[in-house]
Image: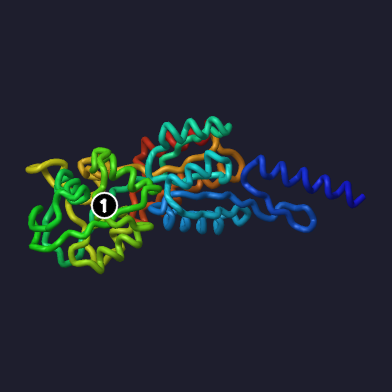
Amino acid sequence: MNKKILIIGVVAVIIVAAIGAAVVLGNDGSKERTTVTEQGSDTMLELMTILAEDFHDSQGSVQVDVTGGGSGVGIEALTQGHIDVAQASRSIKASEMAAAQQNGVTPVEFAVAIDGIAIIVNQGNTVGSLTIEQLRGIYNGTYTNWNQVGGADMPISAFGRQSTSGTYDFVKEAVMEKGDFAPSVSPETGNAAITVKVQQTAGGIGYVGIGYAKQATSAKIVPLAEESGGASFLPTDETAVYNKSYPLSRSLFLYTDGTPSDAVKQWMEYVLSDEGQNTVAQEGFYKLDPATLQTMRDRLSA
């Protein structure tokens, strides 16, 4: 009898692992809690954690465990079948998609929020604005003093992200034109670490998600222009972010293995609900525009 129960238990565990989201059973066999696992972008970590808490409070039976580590880490975990959802501040790469398919995983992309990467400097910095070319020069080592880009005579201390970060990848492509960062650029573990370093360093500069920049009271956000002589915009300008007049506008994504169902689908529906999108805005990011939001909802229901 005990052997039979053991065999049934092992089979049940195997089935749960194959499904993805883990189901926790009560002593009487009733379903008590389902856990959805999510990992990835540090830019999205605080936002997704708050959304997960609100989602759990709204229904009680599904818990979402959210961790960071960077977009690349999250996508790799999804492609290997280790998690249910990957959060990413960039689109999945062709190489990552190929690796996923080799493992029998089919990543499906859902945009869930809009972000404007903010360029922040120390509050005492007098620089008025920067162009993308000047920003590139700062991060590739061409410019080493603020007086070379319209600021005071002060050494530049540039802070960036680690290579596993989706924000790192985005800046490398959008600003650096896939060129290398200078060895002097200090790689930090996340948005919060960059913000602290910039606030503590007179000549500091860093790039962070807009939600973090709005909380940095001892740093200031620098307006950006696409080119010299062009109009400059702030990532706090919602219209400029939506129409991409602000040059570092981007989408934030969640990836699932195929079109989600059951608990994962419930979670995704909440993130894309009006309530979820209101939380996106409350945390300093931007809601999806109505057309994109409807497209994502339709994709979820496909």
For mark 1, does the 10 Å Cα neighbourhood hold few (<14), some (14 to 19), or many (20 or more) residues? few
Horizontal side of 115 relative to 204 (left or right) equals right
Count of marks overlaid on the render? 1
Disc 1 designates what residue? 183
User: Does residue 199 sit above or below 9 in this rendering?
Assistant: below
The residue nearer to you, when weighing 87 against 277, is 87
Quarter holding residue 8 = top right
Residue found at the very far front of the displayed protein = 183
In x, y percent, where is residue 224? 17, 48
In x, y percent, where is residue 233? 17, 48
Q: Secondary structure at mark 1?
A: loop
The residue depicted at 62 percent of the width and 46 percent of the height is 21
The residue nearer to you, when weighing 83 against 173, is 173
The residue depicted at 46 percent of the width and 43 percent of the height is 254
Which amino acid, by three-letter code, is at mark 1? Pro
Horizontal side of 194 relative to 265 (left or right) equals left
The residue nearer to you, when weighing 300 against 100, is 100
In x, y percent, where is residue 287? 36, 47
The residue depicted at 31 percent of the width and 43 percent of the height is 170
Horizontal side of 173 relative to 189 (left or right) equals left
Horizontal side of 160 relative to 27 (left or right) equals left
Quarter holding residue 189 = bottom left
